[in-house]
Image (tube, rainbow, N blue to C red):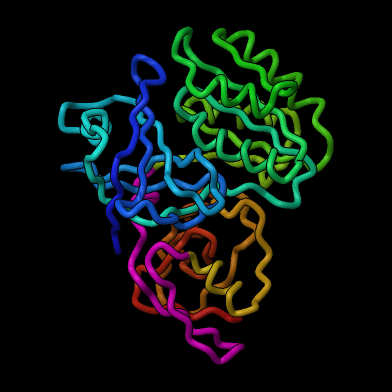
Amino acid sequence: MSTFALEVTDVVDDSPEVRTLTLARPDRGWLPSFTPGSHLILECGPSVNAYSLHGDSQMPDAYTISVLRTGSAEGGSRWLHERRPGDTVLARPPRSLFPPMQKASKHLLVAAGIGVTPILSHLRAAVRWGHAVEVRYMHRPGHGVHLEELRNLAPGSLRSFTDRVQFRADLELCLQRQPIGTHLYCCGPATFMDAVREVAARRGWPLERVHTERFGADVLDPGKSFDVALSVSQKVITVAPGRSLLEELEDQGLAVPNLCRQGFCGECRIDVTAGIPLHRDQYLEDEERAANDSLMCCVSRAASDRLEVPL
């Protein structure tokens, strides 16, 4: 997949473990706009890592990321913590797997630790578009990042916590009183997101209104190009690396029902009449995956060179 060079123009230490880097084109030209909640994949020395973009998403002149220092001395986060203004980093274009739902009546943003970065991006967008929004942020004492920006953007709707018991009690009440049509967005450690999803499910929240950002191997892998034969339309389309089958179908004018666009809700399930899917969803049971007769077109791809679908 194509890469492009970005120059480190500023470095700020937000907490003892988190460093924010500002990255711009060497010629200081405009960078591609991105969907709020998108991430940028960087080649960090010996490794490749994904980092959420949290700056302005519309015609940005720079990208900003915040990096938690973790892992071994050879890890990507430590490599980025060693970068200084003037250094160059190779990047791949922004990708969106955690977008805001435009039809939501309200956006409830929940974060823990460094998971606040895509939540900050969502908050900027909600404020820009005049959408109703609330923010809940859990962090360790002295380790909260971007708190001033959060307060400035959401002065009356932000609550931050350093106590897990208090956070859990507030979350229970918060989820209970949200208006119909509210969507929940959550990012943080896997155990934290699982706990938030469990509370939401117990409170009766539909799965399609709960969105989480998980940086697994699938995020870093744009996938290989594959062809899809549309047996009804009598067309063959090509799904490029980094693009989803759902996006390509929408470009063809085909209206495919979808909600979460993350492989959780099952709404975009389509039949497969030939070829072998590469399942990347969190919805299908093991037996359904083994049948290879359907896939979630928002995230799944092809294990074979070609698929056929009755569209």
x then y, percent, for residue 20: 38, 30
Q: Quadrant of the N terminus?
A: bottom left
Between residues 224 and 67, which one lies in front from this camera angle? 67
Between residues 126 and 175, which one lies in front from this camera angle? 126
The residue drawn where x is 38% and y is 43% is: 216
Q: Quadrant of residue 159?
A: top right
Q: Is 114 displayed left or right of 103 in the figure?
A: left
User: Was residue 182 drawn as part of the magenta stretch in this picture?
Assistant: no
x then y, percent, for residue 244: 48, 65
x then y, percent, for residue 284: 53, 54
The residue drawn where x is 26% and y is 35% is: 85
Residue 79, placed above or below residue 298: above
Residue 102 can be seen, yes or no? yes
Q: Quadrant of residue 16?
A: top left
- For the record, the magenta segment spans 216-243
Q: Is 264 displayed left or right of 68 in the figure?
A: right
Between residues 207 and 118, which one lies in front from this camera angle? 118
Residue 204, placed above or below residue 261: above
Residue 265, placed above or below residue 114: below
Between residues 259 and 140, which one lies in front from this camera angle? 140
Q: How many marks?
A: 0
Q: Quadrant of residue 66?
A: top left
Q: Is 180 displayed left or right of 305 in the figure?
A: right
The residue drawn where x is 64% and y is 24% is: 152
